[in-house]
Amino acid sequence: MHPIRLAALAALLCTTSTFAAEGGGAPGKTAEELSKPCAACHGPDGNSTNAQYPRLAGQYHDYLQRALQEYKSGERKNAIMAGFVATLSDADMDALARYYGGMPGKLDDLSKHEQGD
Amino acid sequence: MTRILLARFILRATTLALFAAACATSALAQDASKGDAKAGHTLVYTCGGCHGVTGYKNAYPNYHVPRIAGQNYDYLVAALTEYKKGERAHPTMRAQGESMSDADIRNIAAYLSSITP
């Protein structure tokens, strides 16, 4: 198994069992604390260097929030992400989305990068 | 004695050259499968209608369309392929994905991931 996947799964198992005891949600956790499991794949600064995983830093926060909600509802299917979001409350997802959206990153819209022939 | 040494040297040099050639070939093969950023640059003209308008929002539900310039290559290929296969729900993106060949997807991803701020 790929080391990063293994790390993600291990992190997933840890968070699942911890949060299950609290009955879902993580009251009082800061976005930085909530982001620890995310860092395994998306990087501590939200700029994943493994091309398999999306960069989050500087993404629109409401898009990130929507993506997390879709993983939770099952509208978007990804085994790893489904496991992580299962433990997050709406407030947690909002906090995480704002946390990563506010980070400096390489993402941009296409306004300066499109062309016609 | 000298002749044997010379023969050994030639054998080793040939082996080395063959190995180097094999490496170069596989590197080229990888580049070819990775998509052509120049071809992608032309294709993303369509994407700019939504992703090229700073602050543009999806009508319903209401959230910003994501920043895709500078996103990671493998993730972009996976996302577009999921839209193409109908595994991700967004209607406009599904329609776009269905119109793309696998090569188009790789070319678009190659261009978008090559963009730096």
Image (tube, coloured by chain):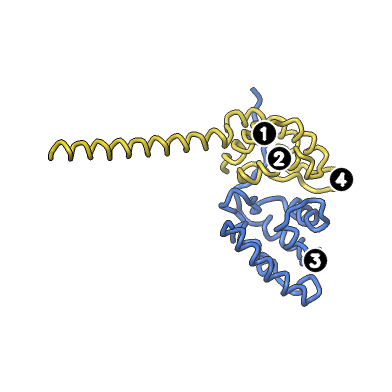
Q: Chain of mark 4?
A: B
Residue behind mark 1: B102
Examine the rendering and report whether any part of residue A36 can be seen: no
Name the kind of residue labelled 2 in the image. Thr
Residue behind mark 4: B60
* x, y percent for residue B11: 27, 37
Residue behind mark 2: B81
Labelled pair 2, 1 in contact (Cβ < 8 Å)? yes
Please state which of the two labelled residues, at mark 4 or mark 3, is closer to the viewer.
3
Report the Cα–Cα distance between label 1 and label 3.
37 Å
At x 23% / y 40%, what residue is drawn?
Answer: B8
Crowdedness of circle 2 by 10 Å Cα count: few (<14), some, many (20+)?
many
At x 81% / y 63%, what residue is drawn?
Answer: A90
Crowdedness of circle 3 by 10 Å Cα count: few (<14), some, many (20+)?
some
Residue A85 versus residue B116: which sits nearer the camera? A85
User: Do callouts 4 and 3 point to residues on the same chain?
Assistant: no
* Lower position in the chain sequence, tag 2 or tag 1: 2
